[in-house]
Image (spheres, rainbow, N blue to C red):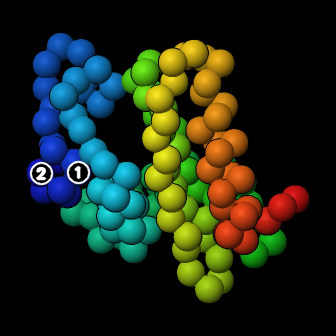
Amino acid sequence: MRKIAYGNAVAGGSKPFWVEGDLAISANEQISFLRHLYRNELPFRVEHQRLVKDVMVNEAGRDWILRAKTGWSGKVGWWVGWVEWPTGPVFFALNIDTPNRFDDLSKRQEITRNILRSIKALPTS
């Protein structure tokens, strides 16, 4: 994780470090990571980066693709990714507190989709 500058790069322990450990990353750091992934600039084989991007496809239209990944610690929910357009990508990273646990999970995508639609980065229908 240090090699790819992923947050504080703290990993290890008996619990899943990306959920319950000390790994921490800001929304800006997530965007930086996503930009490198989008451009196949991570220190991994290009075919592996392309595979990750393939599994990130959430939705697509005739001229756009929404690639994203959720995350949840039980307390904080994430939705990060980008919308690809012929004119270029629009990156996003949202994290929200989820005090109502499962009842709050859908809000990650609802909030982000509404914002993306409001800036015309995602079609309205």
Residue type at tag 2: Arg
Give the crowd class for mark 1: few <14, some 14-19, many >=20 residues within 10 Å. some
Residue 43 percent location from the top left of the image: 22, 63
Residue at (66% x, 57% y) in the render: 115
Left or right: residue 106 versus residue 74 is right
Residue at mark 1: 6
Residue 8 percent location from the top left of the image: 15, 44
Residue 1 percent location from the top left of the image: 17, 47
Q: Residue furthest bottom?
A: 87
Residue 26 appears in the figure: yes
Residue at (13% x, 56% y) in the render: 3
Residue at (26% x, 60% y) in the render: 44
Query: Is 11 situated above or below 65?
Result: above
Q: Residue furthest right?
A: 125
Residue 28 percent location from the top left of the image: 34, 58
| Quarter of image, res 29 | bottom left
Badge 1 element: loop
Residue 46 appears in the figure: no
Residue at mark 2: 2
Q: Are marks 1 and 2 in contact (CB under 8 Å)?
A: yes
Query: Is 61 situated above or below 54?
Result: below
Left or right: residue 101 versus residue 111 is left
Residue type at tag 1: Tyr
